[in-house]
Image: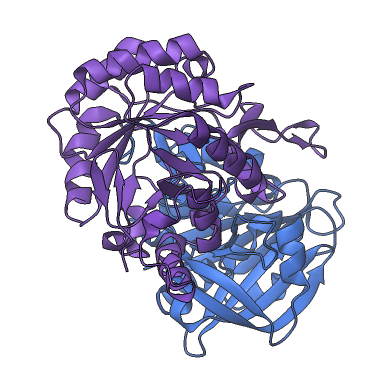
Chain colours: A blue, B purple
Amino acid sequence: MKVQEIATVISCERLADGIYSTVLRAPEIVKTALPGQFVCVYCDDKAHLLPRPISICDIDAAAGLLRLVYRVVGFGTDELAGKGEGATVRLLGPIGTGYEKVTEGSERPVRILFGGGIGIPPMLLLAKEWSKAGYEVHAVLGYRTNDLFLVKDFEGYATCHIATDDGTVGTHGTVLDALAAEGLLDAAGEGRTLFAACGPMPMLRGIAKLATEREIPAYISLEERMACGVGACLGCIVKSRDVDGHSHVHNKRICTEGPVFAVSELCI
Amino acid sequence: MNTSVNFAGVTLKNPVLTASGTFGSGMEYSEFVNLNRLGGVVTKGVAVTPWEGNPTPRVAETTGGMLNAIGLQNPGLDVFMSRDLPFLRKFDTKIVVNVCGHYEEEYVEAVARLADSCADLLEINISCPNVKEGGIAFGTNAAKIEEITRAVKRVARQPVIMKLSPNVTDITEMALAAQNGGADAVSLINTITGMKIDINRRTFALANKTGGLSGPAIKPVAVRMVYQVAQKVSIPILGMGGIACAEDAIEFLMAGATAVSVGTANFNNPRVTEEIVAGIETFMKNHAVDDINSLIGCVK
C-alpha cells in the first residue's frame, strides 16, 4: 500500500565518492516495505517536479527507519545528500513489485545476488531476508575501483565476492568474471541456484544470458526514467515477452509490475 | 456557494478535471484521490486498437516542467470499454474520454463505438506531438481540423471537445475551425514541442528526440492562448497547461476557461487535484464569491 509520508532525516553520510547513505524515519512506508521495492523522493525545489525513484537499501521495522543509499547524479540526489539530521523529505512508497514475486523456495537453496555499482544497495535487504529464511546467500559486488561501499553491511548475511573494473580489489573485471573466477556456480550446482541482480543493463543482460543458458531462475531489478511512480503515465516501460495486463501490448510498467522481473518475462 | 459549471451542456460539480495522459483512467490515482470530489476525469487517449507507444526513455525533467514522448500507448477500445469505463462509472464524476487515431476514419470509428457508452463527453486529440500520424499532423491545419470535427460530430452522441495544439502561429484560427466544424467545446493547450540533450551521453534525453513540454513552465503561454481563444469563439474552453494549485486554476477561469484540467502536477503530488478543488472553495469564501461562474472570463 503506497502512502505519502513526510520523513525525517536521522543521519546522512558519504560512503564513497558520490555515494551517500540517508537514514529516514518513515514508519508508515516501512510498515509494508519489501526487498526490491523503491520509494519516490520529491524535491523541495518547486522547479524540479518529478519524483526520484530510489531503491530501498534497508529497513529497521521496529524503529520505523528506512535507509536509502544512492549516487548523486543530479539536482534531486544532490538536494537529498545535502539534508542533515532533522531535515524533512517528502516520500511516496513503498512502490512496485519486489522480490516477493520469486516463486522458488528450498529447492533453490543457493541464492547468488549480483550488485553492480549503484545496483548494490537493494541487494542488502534481500540478502538479510534470504539469509534469515535459511538460504545460502552469496553477494557478488561489482565496483569501478577500490572505493568500496556497503561490503561490511553484507557481512553476516552473505558471503561477499568482489569484482573491480580496475582490478584493485578482488577479481579484475565484472561480477560475472568474479562468479567464474571463484567457481561459485560449479560449487553450488546450477540446479540448486537462483540469481538476483541489480545494476547496469549490460551486466543484467550478461546475467540473463548465463541464466537462460544454464536454466537458472533469475530475477532482475530495473531502472528507468519515471514521471508518476504509480503506474498511470506509462513512462517507465520495459518490453515484455507476453502481452501486459495494463495496455495489452508488450510493455510492462517498471513502477508497477516491476521493478523486479523474472528474466523469462522480458525481452532485454 | 455554487462551484458547478455548465460545460457544453454537461453539469460539472466543479471545474476541476484531470488532463489526459497524466491520470490513466483514474484507477491508479484513486488510491490517493477521492474521485467523487472531481468535476471530471479525462482519460488517457484511447484508439480503436492497442498502441505500443514509443521506445524509452519516454520522459525527462526540465526546469519547471517535463518533456514526454509516451506515444499514446493504450489498450484499445475493447479493454477500455470493458474495464476502465465501468470502473469510472462507479464514481460521482463526469467521464471525458480522450480519443486518438492515426487517420480520420479511426477517430470516427472510435467515436461511433463510444456513442452508446457511459462517457459524458469526448475529447478528440488532434494535437499529440509524439506520433507520426494523426495527432499534431491534423492539429496544425485549420482546414483539416474543421473537416475532422465535422466527421466526428456526424457520429458522436456526446458533446465533442477538440483538443488544440499550441504549436501553431495563431491558435484562434484553429479554435474557430473547430467551432465551424460543429465542435461543442475546445480544450487547450496540449504540450509544446521541445527537446533536451543529455550532454554527458551526447545524445537526446528522449528516445523520440523531441517531446511535449508540460508543467508550470508553459502556464503563461497557456493562459495567453486561453484568453485569445475566449475572445474569438462562443463555445466553452477547457483550459490547461501547468496548473499546479488553486490560484493557477482561477487564473485560467478568469482568462475565459469554463473548466480546467490538471496534468503534470499529479506527478509531483498525487493528491493535487483534490487539493485544488478545496483551494478554489477557500478562495471563493475569502473573496466572497457566491458563484464560480462570475469568475469565468471576468478579465477582459
Q: Where B298 sits versus B99, above or below? A: below
Indicate whether B201 appears above or below A112.
above
Residue in the picture at 35% in, 62% down? B291
* Quarter of the picture holding the N terminus of chain B: bottom left
Residue B111 in percent (x, y) is at 24, 23
Residue A178 in view here: yes
Return the x and y of residue A208 as percentages of the image width and height.
Answer: 52, 39
Estimate the x, y position of residue B260 in percent, counting from the top left: 44, 48
Residue B177 drawn at (x, y percent):
44, 18
Q: Which residue is drawn at 55% across and 78% down?
A: A6
Q: Is residue A102 visible?
A: no
* Residue at position x 42%, y 67% in the image: B289
Q: Which residue sits at x=20%, y=57%?
A: B92
Q: In this view, does B218 lie to the left or right of B23?
A: right
The C terminus of chain B sits in image quarter: top right
**Which one is in front, B194 or B297?**
B297
Farthest residue toward the bottom?
A63
Nearest to the observer: residue A193 or residue B31 = B31
Height in image: B160 above or below B255?
Answer: above
In the depicted view, which residue is nearer to us: B142 or A230?
B142
Q: In this view, does A249 lie above or below B39?
A: above
Number of numbered tags placed on the structure image: 0
Extreme residue toward the front, this view:
B300
Report the front residue among A37 and B44.
B44
Q: Within the image, what quadrant is residue B281 found in? A: bottom left
